[in-house]
Image (cartoon, rainbow, N blue to C red):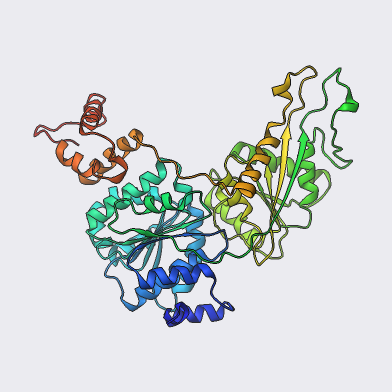
Amino acid sequence: MNVFDRYAPFIRNYIYESGWQMLRGVQNAAGDVIFNTDENLLLTASTASGKTEAAFFPILTLLEENPSNSVGVLYIAPLKALINDQFERLSHICEEADINVTRWHGDTTQTGKRKLLRKPSGILQITPESLESLMINKHMEIVSLFHDLRFIVIDEIHSLLRGDRGLQTFCLIERLCRAAGCDPRRVGLSATIGNPKAAGDFLACGSKRKTLIPEFDRGKEKLRLSMEHFFNTAPQAGEDKEDSISEPIGDKAPTGANPGLAYIFEHTKGRKCLIFTNSREECEAVCQNLLQYCEFNREPDRFLIHHGNLSASYRESAEDEMRDDESLVSICATATLELGIDIGRLERAFQIDAPFTVSGFLQRLGRTGRRGEPAQMWFVMREDHPEPRAIMPEMIPWYLIQGIALVQLYIEERFVEPPRLERLPFSLLYHQTMSTLASNGEMSAGELASKVLTLSAFTRISQDDFRKLLLHLIETDHINRTEGGGLI
């Protein structure tokens, strides 16, 4: 029986209604692993490749055939916006099968949370931070919530592979499974990563299963890349202007206009684009300057902003505007739109200066090129004009060199940064020690060590080092010793 025939009827109906002609390679590969093995699964594919459906179609089929007696699927995502986006998609898919979908993060209401606590079932969508809060504040409900948990799906897992947040997530998964007495399969959804095997090993941390990483036909990759370089400032006094590069800004530019932003302003007209920056401050400044161009040219505002410091309602309004096929606006964004939030069809992405990593470049590039079109990235490098008598290092256009290097690393060498996991994550050790005490209440030092040091993230940390940490925390009043010798 092929994968499509194995899907539940409500999944097949959804596929027919969506007008799909066939399953993609990633969907056949995921279905084969989930239906025919009992192992973990890591799916690596570009944005808009159908990874979410590839994972959830077989999972939902199994859940409908054999309903769980608790939450059946725990979906963990790094961003609230991604959870909100996937909530709408999954709710629509699950409606016919009457499978409950609940989102749980800081921007959601208490109504859905209380309903889930009263009758745990279906899919729970959550961020790592909200999962930790749930384990601390609802510790007594963990067993009833998760005792029959079948799958843990971790979306955009590559974003968790280069720091403590990823280790924190897997510490929480291990603690949850121990507390609830469950042994769910794990499914990781990832963009292209440099070392899939290392990522697969990371996914399996603390699990009794190995991770399968299926190969499948990904089709031909088509890219369109452009790289422009601009000076922010005019040549300094005494410099030979004939030897300098000058970019005309144009007649319709505000006073003190930036030539790089003038280029973006002109090339986003009549198009739906993303403009990526490397910081929130830069994002604010770029959007404000582009809006000044609109005002100066007596054009309607056509630039929006999206980053993590904005209110949820403002971010969602910008996302809805981008999903509107009739709207030709552009969004200035940080990494909040780097991940797989559905914002409709984009014509091109702009990157101001070079991103910090090849993986970041690929994520941002992958937001375009849907529906069979080539992915497009237009780099706009901006640097100050060098001083008249600057020595060689100061004359080198470093942003331009960095951008060229990022492209060459991927195009010529297919290099993507491998996972970077700290050997001795002491800051995370402190964090998980405090979290475990907050969840469990008073514990002896031995009980605490048995719960914390046995987590996969801390296998290289000795008992003696942990004892020193506990003594330091007692001395600094972060934790207290009770009359009976326990720790709280």
Give the quarter of the image for residue 218.
bottom right
Q: Is residue 382 left or right of residue 145?
A: right
The residue sitting at 81% across, 48% down in the picture is 266
The residue sitting at 19% across, 40% down in the picture is 448
- How far across and down, in percent of the image, does residue 406 sit? 63, 42
State the quadrant of the N terminus. Answer: bottom left
- How far across and down, in percent of the image, does residue 380 sit? 72, 42
**Count of all numbered marks drawn on residues in the image:** 0
State the quadrant of the C terminus. Answer: top left
Q: Nearer the viewer, residue 282 or 177?
A: 177
Q: Nearer the viewer, residue 244 or 432?
A: 244
- How far across and down, in percent of the image, does residue 250 sit? 87, 41
- Outermost residue, front direction? 413
Q: Nearer the viewer, residue 400 or 137?
A: 400
- How far across and down, in percent of the image, does residue 404 sit? 68, 41
The residue sitting at 80% across, 19% down in the picture is 388
Q: Is residue 257 above or below residue 379?
A: above
Q: Is residue 132 left or right of residue 308?
A: left
Look at the image and tell me whether residue 306 can be seen: no
Give the quarter of the image for residue 179.
bottom left
Q: Is residue 117 left or right of residue 99?
A: left
Q: Is residue 268 left or right of residue 438?
A: right
Q: Is residue 422 above or below residue 104?
A: above
Look at the image and tell me whether residue 368 can be seen: yes
Q: Nearer the viewer, residue 348 or 323?
A: 348
Give the quarter of the image for residue 348.
bottom right
